Amino acid sequence: MLNVRSRLKSAAIGVLALTATALSASAGEVTLWSWRTEDQAAMEKIFAAFTAKNPDITVKLQFTPDADYQNRLSTALRGGKGPDIAQLKAYGELQPLVDGGYLDALNDSVPELKDFTPAALGGSVGIADGKIYGVPYSTPVMGVFYNTEIFEKNGIAVPKTYDEFVAACEKLKAAGVLPIAAGGANGSGWALEINAGVVGPSVYGAGFYDEMISGKAKFTDARYVKALEKIKALQPYYSDGFAGVDYTTATQQFISGKAAMFFGGAWENGSFKAQNPNLKFSIFPFPGDKAEAQPAVSAFSDGSYGLVSDSENKEDATKVLSFIASPEFAQLFADNLGWPPARSGATANDPVLKSMLEMQANATPYLTLVGFRWQTPTASSVVQAEIIDMIEGKIAPEKLAADVDAAVSTWFKPKP
């Protein structure tokens, strides 16, 4: 299917190239679609810096809420009415667009990609041909965001062990403070899956991912089950009416200062600051049973920006992609959004970002996303569907682990 479509595109590419060249010379406008509505102000500032140095090119940003984005993009691409540049999901979620022939490989057109690490590029690679189809923008880590003022007011230090973490939750609860803002209602199961990404590495360690991929370990492994047990054990400290609390409500509980902690990823940093500039917070790795100098944390490539094959402004769009791959973009991204940039070398001028970059020193791939979201049923689909029942005690952690294992066993082939 891919080959047929590619040949058809190749036959027309000469004509398109001439047309694109002519259009780009006069149009000078590159459309870029994104699902990060919360980042709109920052992204407009970042791309204004590009236009300041490239006055003949304007980047027209269009944002669609995440819940609707993938469907809108897929529909537009099938109809030949997509943007010039599309923000792309990573890993398995990228593959349908690559297989459909909707994206151009960037290996040759964006030489700056050679300066990225394999881990940063991992989410942008086509599984069939190994080519790079997007410029990655961030490699987020996951951890525990905490309100530093609430911690200080209640005499709580950053927990170094799991027991200290539970003790902190008890102290906060006794003081009338919600310890952890969390909930899985209204399609927020993905946010609860993040709890597994935050807590998991503290139990199974940084090397567990390689054991899983090689087939030496499975989701039914005692270490993965123990991680689920710890997530369940924290239920008394989650938001009241937890089953009816969605992601947005949970974030507002933290942003407003009603909750002391929130399990999340690096992308929350800029969003929290934008919604409450007065919020005093930082982040720490979820602690293990024993104190460690550098606890393991989950990390992954969040996504990338790709060149749409049907774009009529490829020359200008490629210049924009080269900018996204540049050190300048990485620094602007860090300064305006507070995420760890995909390209290394940026200076952390934000203390929360500095903590996240330090956490990257002992990072392991976010297990369910990086390793087990390539075909259906994905590990994530099972975790997101069942984790709320596990936390509420309706199913055992062993049952969830077995269901995940059974699901991925239908398609996953270990790589010894």
Image (cartoon, rainbow, N blue to C red):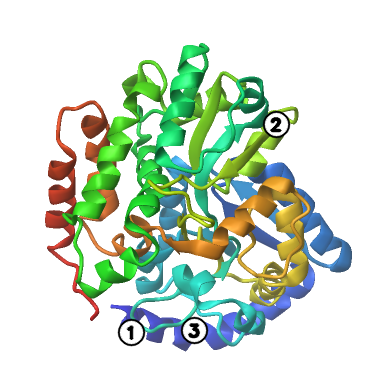
Q: Read off the residue under disc 1.
A: 3
Q: Is residue 230 left or right of residue 271?
A: left
Judge the density around disc 3: few (<14), some (14-19), many (≥20) Cα neighbours within 10 Å. Answer: few
Which x, y percent locates residue 300? 47, 61
Type of amino acid at the residue the image marks with label 2:
Lys
Q: Which residue in the protein does label 2 denote?
A: 280
- Give me the C-alpha separation between circle 3 and circle 2: 55 Å
Dot 1 or dot 2, earlier in sequence: 1
**Separation of residues labelled 1 and 2 (CA atoms):** 53 Å
Mark 2 surroundings: few (<14), some (14-19) or many (≥20) residues within 10 A: some
Identify the residue under disc 3.
Answer: 12
Q: Please give the name of the residue rendered at 78% of the width and 67% of the height, measured from the top-left corner.
A: 328
Please give the name of the residue rendered at 26% of the width and 67% of the height, measured from the top-left corner: 212
Q: Nearer the viewer, mark 3 or mark 2?
A: 2
338 or 313, which lies in front?
A: 338
| Mark seen at residue 51 | none
- Residue 217 visible? The answer is yes
Question: Disc 1 or disc 3, which is closer to the eye?
Answer: 1
Q: Is residue 61 visible?
A: no
* Disc on the earlier residue, 1 or 3: 1
The three-letter amino acid code for the residue at tag 3 is Ala
Residue 138 place in picture, x, y as percent: 59, 60
Residue 180 horizontal/vertical position (percent): 46, 27
The quarter in which the C terminus is drawn is bottom left
